[in-house]
Amino acid sequence: MNIKDIKKEFPIFDNKVHNNDLVYLDSANSSQKPKVVVDRIYDFYTKEFSNVGRSVHYLAVAATNLYENTRVLVQKYINAKDPNEIVFTKGATEAINLVANTFGQKYLKEGDEILITELEHHSNYVPWHYLRKSKGVKINFADVDENGDISIESIEKKITPKTKILAITHLSNVTGAILPIKEIIQLAHSKNIPVLVDGCQGAPHLKLDMQDLNCDFYAISCHKMYGPTGLGVLYAKKKWLEELPPYQGGGGMIGEVKKEGITFGDLPNKYEAGTMATAQVIAFGESINFINKLGIDKIEEHERELTKYGEEILRKNNSVKLIGSPKNKGSVLSFTLDGIHPHDIATILDEDGVAIRAGHHCCQILHEKLGLAATARASLGVYNTKDDLDQLNSSINKCIKIFNS
Amino acid sequence: MDLKDLYQQLILDHGKNPRNLGKFENFNKDAKGHNPLCGDKVHVYLKLDENKKISDIKFEGEGCAISMASASIMTELMKNKEEPEVKELIDDFLKMIKDSPELSSKIISEDEKTKLMSLSGVKKYPMRVKCATLPWHTLVSAMTDKPGEVNTEKED
Ligand SMILES: Cc1ncc(COP(=O)(O)O)c(C=O)c1O
């Protein structure tokens, strides 16, 4: 892969930040967008716009076909069995809320337990939290180890006869740990526990195969996959989407509406109430085409090499403390500097055009466990190079110099 | 250039070695402040004596250099000030951080003004303004016995 050429496909890199080239190291937060995706939104609105699934005129039929075409692209990208297993949502957050809400409503009762981990993003904890009050369920946390990893044993330890669902991240957005989720899913299934995987950080970086993983639910954030904001995907096994109640009510998700009662529509419409993020869905098709054109295998390989390089140079820098050294690390380099708060680091790096994130990264449970209020995080995308990481390192050194002056 | 304005020597010094850090026995007013976006935390303790004068003031906290320096400089300045002066200085500082080019208060010396103005560098960094103002909002809360915690996301 020629990264210089790939970078050229992202118009954002034509801009300067504080008169410097942009070194974008915040892709775990949200990735940049290739021109094909941005153009697709413009073209759709200027040449092809119509609402989908409602009218029979030419534009409506064409828009509906484009919209459904993305569903098939997603299905193939994650190797789901059926396009009807793909539900569009407003983000991964909504995808998880959908499952917590409907699964909780139908299957959970007082005293039941939900198992999550200490690595989870607030999006994979807070939606479940509501069920404490509404259903009287308990939430258990599998322990993260000193490497920032979650082992199969730590999951097994927290499973009880009352555990009704396991919700777990694929790739930690703080420690970068890639969890052995296939084995974890096998373990949970052997005890009849369905599994939701928060795939926000998995989907942009790892080759996915839903049939092989055999998870029950997989949540995806499209804006982290070189796609538009305001869009997420919930993959769910068909039997769940058939069995679970609808999430939101409104137009498009109904069968028949009478004063006496309502029947609900078939999949996937059942879970897509109201006018959806049509332009974003259609443009997201281009994100998948973009990834497919490069090849997710190649992207994975490139990012693995970069992560390793980043780890190496930051470990050599005595002032840097890397957070998390999991067995299998992907695309995330969180760190702290002695005596310098992550927000000061981020502000100083920004002056050089180096964009990182500082804070708790929506993982307060993990930060509490680590005994840190905040960390700095550099995260990678397909457009990053070793030069970017060298720049990161030299800006870190500048930061240390300012603070020690 | 701007970065040098933000991280002036004085700020770095107060950030690394905050004055009045800690807690003391006989405080009679206190309040906590928290910025949930970045995790900055301060807890301001003070003793308001019978003449409504701050006879002692300290703070506990963790956060970035800007928030720690701001709390440090604020507590230095507020010691031995009477209630109306405290109020005047808080208003003056917050106004300066928001939109006014300088401080207008007559009750502090030029040196003290220079010290306070060292925090004005944050004006160019909208995301960091809350770091500088958190201790001050927390002091308001302590002085007025406002219940609950100051939360930067709920202040204007
Ligand atoms: C691990 C993880 N889960 C969930 C989310 C939330 O995703 P979204 O922004 O699509 O709602 C994020 C992104 O911030 C994330 O990194």
Image: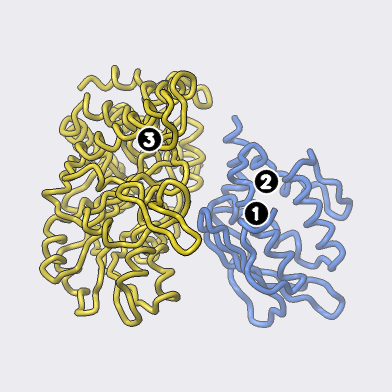
Chain colours: A yellow, B blue
Residue flagged by tag 2: what amino acid is it? Leu
Residue under numbered circle 2: B119
In this rendering, do the residues under marks 3 and 2 share a single chain?
A: no
Numbered disc 2: what chain? Answer: B
Q: CA distance from mark 3 to mark 2?
A: 46 Å
- The quarter of the picture where residue B25 lies is bottom right
Q: CA distance from mark 2 to mark 1?
A: 7 Å
Mark nearer the viewer, 3 or 1: 3
- Left or right: B45 with respect to A45? right
Toward the right, the furthest residue is B106
Mark nearer the viewer, 3 or 2: 3
Q: Nearer the viewer, residue B102 or A72?
A: A72
Answer yes or no: is residue A210 visible.
yes
| Residue in the picture at 38% in, 28% down | A61
Residue flagged by tag 3: what amino acid is it? Val
| Residue in the picture at 17% in, 48% down | A210
Residue under numbered circle 3: A281
In this rendering, do the residues under marks 3 and 1 share a single chain?
A: no
Image mark count: 3
Q: Secondary structure at mark 1?
A: helix
Mark 2, other Cα within 10 Å: few <14 / some 14–19 / many ≥20: many
Residue under numbered circle 1: B70
